[in-house]
Image (tube, grey):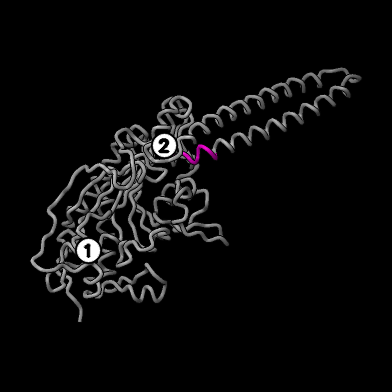
Amino acid sequence: MIDPQLLRDNPDLVRRSQEARGDSVALVDEAVAAEVSRRDAIAAFEQLRASQNQFGKQVAAAPKDEKKALVAQAQSLAAEVKAASAAASDAEAEFHRIVGSIGNPILDGVPAGGEDDFVLIKTVGDRPTFDFTPRDHLELGELLGAIDMSRGAKVSGARFSFLSGIGARLEIAIMNMGLDRAIAAGFIPLITPTLVKPEIMRGTGFLGEHADEVYHLADDDLYLTGTSEVALAGYHSDEILDLEAGPIRYAGWSTCYRREAGSAGKDTRGIIRVHQFNKLEMFSYVLPADAEAEHERLLAQQEGMLRDLGLSYRVIDTAAGDLGSSAARKYDVEAWVPTQDAYRELTSTSNCTTYQARRLDIRYRTESGKTAPVSTLNGTLATTRWIVAILETHQREDGSVVVPEALRPYLGGLEILEPVA
């Protein structure tokens, strides 16, 4: 959730953020009022409890013949304290309910608006050109014996696939290339659980307006994760971290699941938008003062991968209305997909500032000895969708595909993916 101190000191900043996101500005006023009620209720409870403690001492010191009347008063006061405690608890819960619905305040410079209001930061690499009509990734995948959508649908339904033969090898190669680079950059590899408790899913901000994208196992009250970011954020929940030596960085490898609710008719062909995929996610715990520098560091890792895979791409500063509730800024990295004549998102990286850490109670110890929330950041370094851009960018007229040089060591030196009979 957002910093209550920020809400008290600068509610206008939070209002501007809500407006830029296209979210309710009235929520801020409700939160401010709820904060006043919460503090008043807590103050009333503490005052009554202090009176109760003082009266208890008076009862203990009173002569025996006066105690009976005083005990009755003490019992009445105890009932008042109990009621005040309940009122304080209710006010606290109401405050958290309201403030928990407010998105992370965006950082300076994040563009206002929706999906189409992004700001272009850079474009890198020449778009591929062909002297033949290029095939899309699914046609190439079928020629290579790499992608089988029909059997995926037969076994599991729409938006599922089998990656077979070189397709399976290609995905593992991309993931291993990313993992090697993450390890070299100081990330600790983790294979994460893909089922998490509600408090972890809620703490990362995924049970807000996009809750319909998440698979829920009602009998177990567990959620399937759509990114290992969720498990990685929960890894240090309720802990105090030592960040004196620098950020703590993880690279989480997991299968991911998304319901793709509301995407009917979108990207129904191929593996761009599917219910199950693999992903390698970078995740950093850092001091708040270092968060923006760490964000640039994660972006640089992603760009390095795409450049070395020979992909043309662009980086955009995502508009506030297209951010998830936990992100204060997000960069999308979009690769050129020739047959769609468009850039499509391959990866993104988000600076969640202290939003997730506050909800999950992840802290560090300050110089004064007190504790304060850390900042968390995430960014994808490899995922199944990357196969789309690789196949389409590096295809040849006969349906074969040139393997990017940086990827060849992860495919046993293979240079060309050949169509199968």
User: Which quadrant: the C terminus?
Assistant: bottom left
For image coordinates 48% across by 26% down, the residue present is 8
For image coordinates 36% across by 57% down, the residue present is 253
Of 337 and 355, nearer the camera is 337
Q: Give coordinates of residue 143: x percent, y percent.
A: 21, 75
Q: Which residue is mark 2?
A: 18
- Which residue is most to the bottom? 421
Q: Count all numbered tags in the image, as a single digit.
A: 2
| Residue 223 shown left or right of residue 55 in the figure | left
Q: Which residue is mark 1?
A: 410
| Magenta stretch holds residue 99 | yes
Asked whether the viewer can see residue 327, the reply is yes
Q: Amino acid at mark 1?
A: Tyr
Q: Identify the element where label 1 is drawn.
A: helix
Give the extent of the magenta segment.
97-104
| Residue 142 shown left or right of residue 374 in the figure | left
